[in-house]
Image: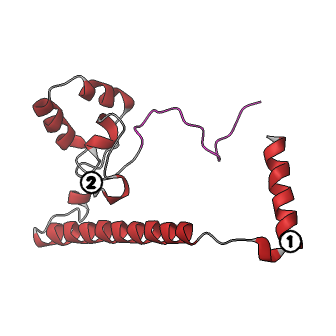
Amino acid sequence: SINVISALLNRCAMYEAKPQSFKFDKMKEIEIKATQEQKRREEGKRKAYEARMLRKAKREKLDDAEYYLRQGADVPSVQTVKQLKTMQSDEKLALWKKSHSQHCMSYHLDIGGCKRDRSCAFLHVNAQGINAFEENDEVAG
């Protein structure tokens, strides 16, 4: 709102007039660095997984080197997620592993999503078909 923007601009003007009044938040910096480091570790784990799967496909002399990377990579649809929520756990797991094994089942099916958040080794991607406005989407009118 306009009041928030006005307060922000006033704070910027105060910091510009009196730079010594600015207090840097060390805890926030530590938190940001920890988050970035965690993300780098997870990306490293993903790259190592992909390299292992490529080596496995080459070792087995498969024509498609990305064969194992394609297994379970399908993003679940909203309808699939709704269907899985009504099924028993054994059937649910079997159906999930068939097409979506690289994706986090908890992220899609558990209330509140995946509790491991960024430390989860599985993919966290929204289900296909969710109506979400993207910044680069064109708007008619």
Relative to 91, does residue 126 appear above or below in the rendering? below
Residue type for callout 1: Glu
Relative to 79, does residue 67 appear above or below in the rendering? below
Identify the image quadrant of the N terminus: top right
Residue type for callout 2: Arg
From the viewer's perspective, tell me whether residue 129 is left or right of residue 87: right
Task: Indicate the secondary structure of the residue bearing disc 2.
Answer: helix
From the viewer's perspective, tell me whether residue 8 is left or right of residue 74: right
Q: Which residue is mark 1?
A: 16
Find the magenta span and give its range.
126-141
| Marks 2 and 1 close (CB-CB < 8 Å) | no
Residue at x-position 37% and y-position 67%: 43
Residue at x-position 34% and y-position 66%: 42
Residue at x-position 80% and y-position 55%: 8
* Residue 127 lies in the magenta-colored region: yes
Q: Which residue is mark 2?
A: 70
Q: Nearer the viewer, residue 96 or 37?
A: 37
Q: Position of residue 101 (x, y in %)?
A: 22, 47
> Within the image, what quadrant is residue 141 found in?
top right
